[in-house]
Amino acid sequence: MLKASQRGNAPSVGFTAKAWSLSSSVAISAFLLSCPASATAQPFDTPSHAAPSAGQVAEGSDLGESTDIIVTARKQSERLIDVPQSVTAVSGADLVRLNATQFRDFANTLPGLQFTTSGAGQTQVNIRGVTTGTSGSQTVGIYIDDVPYGASTSYAQAGQLALDQGLFDLDHVEVLRGPQGTLYGASALGGVIKYVPNAPDTGEFGGTGQVGISSTRHGGTSYNGSGAVNVPIATDRAAVRVGGYYSRDGGFADNVALGSKNVDRSRVYGARIDLLVKPTDRLSIRLVGTGQNVRREGRGTIDYNFDRRPRYGDLQQNRLVPEAFDQNFRLASGTLSYDFGGAELTSISSYQTVRSVVRLDYSALFVPLLSAAAGIPLRSIGVRLDPKTDKFVQEVRLQSAGKGTFEWLVGGFYTDEDSNSKQLITGTNPNGTPFPLAILDVQLPAKYKELAAFGNLTTNLTDKLSVTGGIRYAHNKQRFAQTGGGLLGAATPARKSDENVTTWLASAQYRFSPDANIYARYATGYRPGGPNAVANNPTTGLPLAQPTFEADRLKNYEVGFKGQTADRKFAIDLAGYRIDWSNIQLVVTRNGLSLISNASGGARIWGSELTITARPTRDITVTGAFGYTDATLTAADADLGARKGERLPDVPKFTAAVTADYALSDVSIKPRFGATVRFVSDRQTSFDASPNSPQYDLGDYVTVDLRAGISVGGFDAQLFARNLFDVRGQLSGDARLSLAGGPVQVAVLQPRTLGVSVSKRF
């Protein structure tokens, strides 16, 4: 149960009481709360020929080899085919062959995974349709190894600033579908994306290097490079792995207002140092330091009308204020593992900082709003958001070793997070000089602490049948306030909340053979509730709107089948599910104040995912990945402007990615050729009668990629063509500016891009 308290002596003004000021504040607050100031993969053990279509083989395997895929979805190393839930793994080798440098380069080929974006670093991710559109807090947990990334609440716009991890020196990426509440905790309603870097090797010196260059039609030149080296310090006892990467995206969007070309050009660069020490055969210590910077000069969105035609021309936008984006991410972690013989103890400690600066042009919305409501004539209005998070996480778990009648895991989790989002809105006069007053100048300091205990128990009833039960109990405390002011803002009372949440897991698996099994899974997940910063009634001293909001909850029912033939020439991974999502968190307006509330109704999602791989000969691989998602509301909701049965936004009903690859493996010079065809069905950006963002139809699209490469003497070279037919597929859209006659800002597929890459492993 959520409880709230407040400081008695805190300011009680909130927003100014004048009608024009209140209405402007509501519009601005709703905007700020609801935005950041906003591969196909083969199942199981098939060999990898191209990425992401064959993302299931361990990195470093030669073409033509079949190796077991090892994942850590259940926080233990096991074969992918043995995990009783829907999981996809995309190997690091496949990401290299795909020339993937950003999340967008592989995400839209994985069934059940969707995203909205306005450029590197500004991405919202959802899995299995668990979204109501723009959201302040995330519904998908993002991990680097076992470390959760970013804020757990909506106060630092975590949902809109998903980690765009540089895709270098990775062992693989895991995508876990469905709620992962028992092992991964808060904000994993839809699932988890887990980046798993290559670990140091204490036995052998080695490394990798890669460079690439490409040209985008109507855009700029992109290039990237990365390298990593593994150095054993003491054979079988210690090693260090060091690497770095730099990626420049040339962009393709032109700003006609400022006469700037390719304003969405960006740079993503970073480094990692990873030290592994094994003092004894039982004890392992791993220390990792990593950092990444994102620099982007503008948003990668194009201005469209509601008839889906560009307003200013192909790949054109009109922004009076430059929309640069900067982000710095730093992470230090330490993992200690000790093998007691019958059980293994693991402790993971981490500290991270995330600093983002988001700049947006909202002249098209706020200039007419302030002119009509307040009589303030302005030329332009710019928004700057500075969300930041400092996060300490400690997890300790003890789990059984080996296979037996009972396999168990117990653990504890603690996080201490400090976040703050400075929000500044400034304007310019009609003559271009700065408006003398800040329209809004506030800070939103927040504190989040969570303590949790969790456990899983698997009982192997026979050598074929096993059942698993899991539970997690979490308690969190939060504090949130608004300080500052500006023309339309003011301080609000500091408020607190505390909340207890329990999540559950139950699954059963029957193994027909080591290469085929069927499973059933029930799991729950949640997002934390929290306090709202709302003004007090000056007469009664009571809050003018609800002081807190509660956690939303999700239940997932799933059945699946995984199988492959003994010769691994054919494999199938099929899952069907139903999701019941209740108490959904929404941005609403109450008594003229913008805040987060819980929907009285809920949503129901039916869906399925199918991945099929056929390998008729040693040199030919064909993979198809298909997804179906029917996500609808179970009740009408006035805050959303939605009717009962209406589809959730940004969720395609059908997705498909089919890949074919041919690679010679029995010759010293190994050529290869491949193609990928992707289909995404139509989506809408919001609900039919949304009061905050009119509905825009994104339509469907089909795109084709080609690649041809050669491997010789440890070198791998590849020519590639992305979006061969230069399709303007629309990924996501923001129609809030259209409330005042502005355009719909649409993120589109990268235009046709031709490039070459060369990599070397030594």
Image: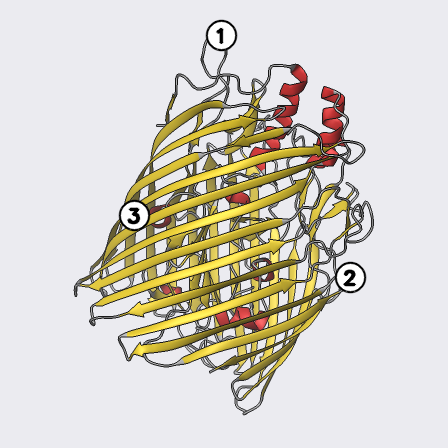
| Mark 2 or 1, closer to the camera | 1
Residue 268 in the image: x percent, y percent? 57, 60
**Which residue matches tag 3?**
470
Residue 54, position as x, y percentages in the image: 53, 70
- Residue on which disc 2 sits: 218
**Mark 3 closeness class: few <14, some 14–19, many ≥20 residues within 10 Å:** many
Q: Which residue is mark 1?
A: 539
Residue 14 against residue 239 in the figure, above or below? above
**Mark nearer the viewer, 2 or 3:** 2
Say which amino acid is labelled 1. Answer: Thr
Residue 581 position, x and y percent, is 47, 38
Q: CA distance from mark 2 to mark 3?
A: 52 Å
Whether residue 26 is visible to the viewer of this picture, yes or no, is yes
> Which comes sooner in the sequence, label 2 or label 1?
2
Q: Is 67 drawn above or below residue 324 in the view shown?
A: below
Q: Residue furthest toward the bottom? A: 668
Q: Secondary structure at mark 2?
A: loop
> On the picture, is 733 further left or further right than 540?
right
- At a point 29% along the width and 73% down the height, the residue shown is 238
Foreground: disc 1 or disc 3: 1
Coordinates of residue 733 in the picture (x, y in percent): 67, 44
Q: Specify the quadrant of the image occupied by residue 134.
A: top right
| Secondary structure state at the residue bearing disc 1 | loop
Residue for point 74% across, 43% down: 319
Which residue type does callout 2 highlight?
Answer: His
Mark 2 vs mark 1, CA separation in Å: 60 Å
- Residue 120 sits in which quadrant? bottom right
Q: Is residue 504 above or below residue 99?
A: above
**Applied colour scheme:** secondary structure
The quadrant holding residue 187 is top left
Q: Amino acid at mark 3?
A: Gly
